[in-house]
């Protein structure tokens, strides 16, 4: 059992204390529990405001100190608590340098690379979609995902491809392989070539599917030789830890996948689905 994409109250949008998140993960029998608090340097680089206010940053020192202490505590209880971070990609040189500096200071056990911001807006919010067709909004998002794969910091996981659809205003919100096959092939081939891990994320916000990315994307990833996958609930409170994992595992097995990949301090290990 694993869940490598979660957020506690250390993240600006997290709700449950980190201690409660770890306790619930242990109660559920997780062997690998990844905490990946938000580090949204992309917001500052793009000048993005949320409800007219600057997004507060995660308390870096407080988070890593508390998480490392919990890591030691749960090691003896049979759960590997992985202390990571979710980096919001932005092509701005200064933003990437901040992520590199953070990585050097704290040496997280794993790094999730995410695309949240495109064209000066978070594509979770209505502003991003103003005066954009579905093709333009989704295409621009995927172009940024492709760009993020060349980030200079040592990330492990490529997160929630399809994030753009979570709050999209279109009747069909799911981003599918057939929408942009050439662009998806470029993204997936690059993930395989770079040896990165593609995330299966069960936080879909009513998008019409149990997880992201679409099964068509995952099937094509398998065809292209991709085998490295991780599971993330994207839980922001204790109620959603590992939510949807069994359903995702069953779907992945049906596509031919046999294992999930756990990134841990630069080493990758496989665990059976």
Image (cartoon, helix red, strand yellow):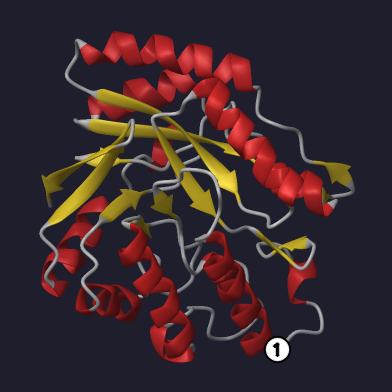
Q: Residue at x 53, y 44 (%)?
A: 153
Near mark 1 (Cα within 10 A), the count class, few <14, some 14-19 or many ≥20, is few
Looking at the figure, which quarter contains the N terminus? top left
Task: Label 1, secondary structure: give it.
Answer: loop
Q: Give the left or right position of residue 214, taking residue 236 as reference.
A: left
Q: Give the left or right position of residue 236, taking residue 168 as reference.
A: left
Q: Quadrant of residue 269?
A: top left
Q: Residue at x 66, y 22 (%)?
A: 59
Question: Quick check: 200 above or below 16?
Answer: below
Total number of numbered discs in the rendering? 1
Looking at the image, which is closer to me, 13 or 48? 48
Looking at the image, which is closer to me, 9 or 150? 150
Question: Where does the image place residue 206, in percent across and percent down from the top left?
Answer: 48, 67
Question: Quick check: 67 above or below 41?
Answer: above
Q: Quadrant of residue 72?
A: top left
Q: Is residue 226 something that shows in the picture?
A: yes
Question: Where does the image place residue 58, in percent across and percent down from the top left?
Answer: 65, 29
Q: Residue at x 45, y 40 (%)?
A: 111
Question: Quick check: 174 above or below 113?
Answer: below
Q: Residue at x 37, y 72 (%)?
A: 188
Looking at the image, which is closer to me, 169 or 159? 159
Question: Quick check: 100 above or below 144?
Answer: above
Question: Where does the image place residue 71, in percent across and percent down from the top left?
Answer: 34, 16
Q: Is residue 13 something that shows in the picture?
A: no
Q: Give the left or right position of residue 65, taking residue 244 as reference.
A: right
Q: Which residue is mark 1?
A: 133
Point out the residue furthest to the right here.
52
Question: Where does the image place residue 167, in percent across and percent down from the top left?
Answer: 62, 67
């Amino acid at each position: 059992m694993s869940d490598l994409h979660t957020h506690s109250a250390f993240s600006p949008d997290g709700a449950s204390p980190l201690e409660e998140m770890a306790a619930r993960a242990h109660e559920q029998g997780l062997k690998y529990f990844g905490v990946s608090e938000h580090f949204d340097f992309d917001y500052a680089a793009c000048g993005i405001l949320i409800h007219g206010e600057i997004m507060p940053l995660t308390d870096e020192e407080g988070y890593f100190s508390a998480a490392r202490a919990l890591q030691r505590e749960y090691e003896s209880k049979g759960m590997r608590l992985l202390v990571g971070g979710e980096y919001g990609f932005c092509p701005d040189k200064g933003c990437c340098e901040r992520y590199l500096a953070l990585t050097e200071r704290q040496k997280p056990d794993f790094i999730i690379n995410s695309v949240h911001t495109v064209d000066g807006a978070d594509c979770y919010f209505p502003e991003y979609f103003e005066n954009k067709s579905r093709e333009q909004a989704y295409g621009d998002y995927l172009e940024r995902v492709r760009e993020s794969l060349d980030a200079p910091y040592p990330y492990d996981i490529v997160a929630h491809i399809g994030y753009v659809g979570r709050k999209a205003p279109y009747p069909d919100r799911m981003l599918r392989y057939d929408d942009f096959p050439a662009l998806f092939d470029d993204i997936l081939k690059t993930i395989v070539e770079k040896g990165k891990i593609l995330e299966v994320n069960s936080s879909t916000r009513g998008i019409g599917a149990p997880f992201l990315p679409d099964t068509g994307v995952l099937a094509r990833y398998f065809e292209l030789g991709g085998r490295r996958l991780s599971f993330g609930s994207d839980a922001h409170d204790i109620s959603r830890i590992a939510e949807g994992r069994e359903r995702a595992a069953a779907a992945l097995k049906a596509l031919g996948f046999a294992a999930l990949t756990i990134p841990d301090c630069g080493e990758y290990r496989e665990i059976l689905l």
